[in-house]
Image (tube, rainbow, N blue to C red):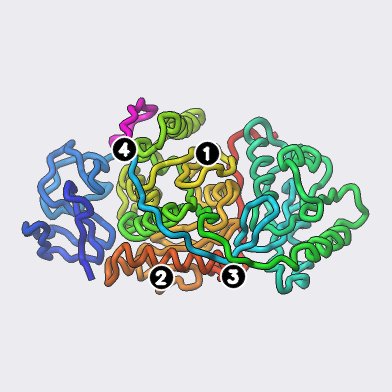
Amino acid sequence: MQEYIRINERDTVAVALKPLSKGTKVVIDEAEIILLEDIMQGHKFALRSLEENEAIIKYGFPIGTAKEFIGKGTWVHTHNIKTTLNDILSYEYEKQIPELEPREERLFLGYERENGKVGVRNEIWIIPTVGCMNNVATAIEKAAKDLIAEGLEDIVAFPHPYGCSQMGDDQENTRTILADLINHPNAGGVLVLGLGCENSNVSELKKYIGEYNPDRVKFLVAQEVEDEMEAARTYLEELAAYVKPMKRVAVSSSHLIIGMKCGGSDGLSGITANSIVGEFSDILISQGGSTMLTEVPEMFGAETLLMNRCETEELFHKTVSLINDFKEYFQSYNLSIYENPSPGNKQGGISTLEDKSLGCTQKSGSAPIKGVLAYGEPIQVKGLNLLSAPGNDLVAATALAASGAQIVLFTTGRGTPFACPVPTVKISSNSALYAKKGNWIDFNAGSVIEDKSIKEVSEELFEYVLRVASGEKVKSEEAGFHDMAIFKKGVTL
């Protein structure tokens, strides 16, 4: 097992891949370094002496500057490094478009929908239009579980606190996301459950849904019926009869749309799990498939790496807006743009937002950026897309699903049990987490620093995703977890 790593030849720090004791001799590029302090797993140590205000390099790029003189072999973390990020910036387009060698498409077993989309699950979704119906939606789900049989894989309610007393963009977000979920290909059938007096009522929501098959989507307004439970049961029986005959068929991997997200990151995330997902993204895109990268605030400090991979100048300007619009959103609430990393990130070895962002963007791989999507906007162009959404795990993962991801890959160094509306594959950055939380974690990227190469593990991840797309359940599905969260941006009346 490797004990430490210098990620890029330009780096002035290395990362401990296991706990290293004070006095340990480290050899990098034939140079000997004696550690002056204990270094925890995922944390950094200086490869040479660093002067006060000198840039500290990791991943080949600055992650901040030294607050004070840092001696060779010293622990480098929040106590002696500071961010250098500024507020709204101007950018120049320095086009650097990589090329991926095409690969032969693979096959998975999915559900072909009448609109040309492909689902990886055949479920019935219960979508309440307003938070007032949450408990009813959950009760309807529980009462209908007996309808699950071959062909119908699950019945799932998606409660949320919105749909009324909202204004402007806030209300627009709710209607857009609910409509996106109603149109999602993983839902073979949908029951839209309204109250009747809410702002985002059924009539309003239909304007966002567009054309729909009345056999696939049913609408129930609770105030218009005597017994909403009884009425819902009737609709669900009709939906079940519509969904059950559907069969999985062999379809090309080019139909896959995979969301990419990280949370509870540690100092190994950018080295193991995020790098593996980046390689996975390149593999899928080389076969004609698509991936989406989001959590915009965790691009701050690494955004130019993405901007320069934009295929056109128009996409470059869209990416600039993506970044600066989010900064302006923070400023509109008089909040710091750089209130990051989180306590858990810091404990795991991440020191600054630049450190976190450079690790986070490893998930984008090396493919050119083909699309830049607004929050809630469905994906239209195959390849790597950037999606506007915050860093919050549930909000960002829901946004990925709403924009069309059939599966979300979620990397973590700390662990989390949450799920989103689609299968959420948890990928651990270290083997200890994988061993400890086997009920949460689906795939271990920690083997990269033990006995396997990034290429080998990324190929294993690709094969695993094909199995999930073909029906194999992830841990959160086995536990019955399905979450959703909508981005709130405005006033509540």
Looking at numbered disc 2 in the image, what kind of residue is underneath it?
A: Tyr
For label 1, the residue is 373
For label 4, the residue is 96
Q: Is residue 242 located in the magenta-colored stretch of the structure?
A: no
Residues rendered magenta in the picture = 84-96
Q: Position of residue 338 (x, y in %)?
A: 39, 38
Disc 1 + disc 2, Cβ < 8 Å: no
Please name the predominant secondary structure of the magenta segment in the image: loop
Q: How far apart are marks 4 and 2 (CA)?
A: 37 Å
Q: Where is residue 487 in the image (x, y as percent from the top left)?
A: 58, 42
Answer with the quarter of the image where residue 36 lies.
bottom left
Looking at numbered disc 3 in the image, what kind of residue is underneath it?
A: Ala
- Front residue (pair 343, 428): 428
Q: How far apart are marks 4 and 1 (CA)?
A: 21 Å
For label 3, the residue is 479
Residue at 13% of width from left, 59% of height from top?
Answer: 35
For label 2, the residue is 434
Label 4 neighbour load within 10 Å: few <14, some 14-19, many 20+: some
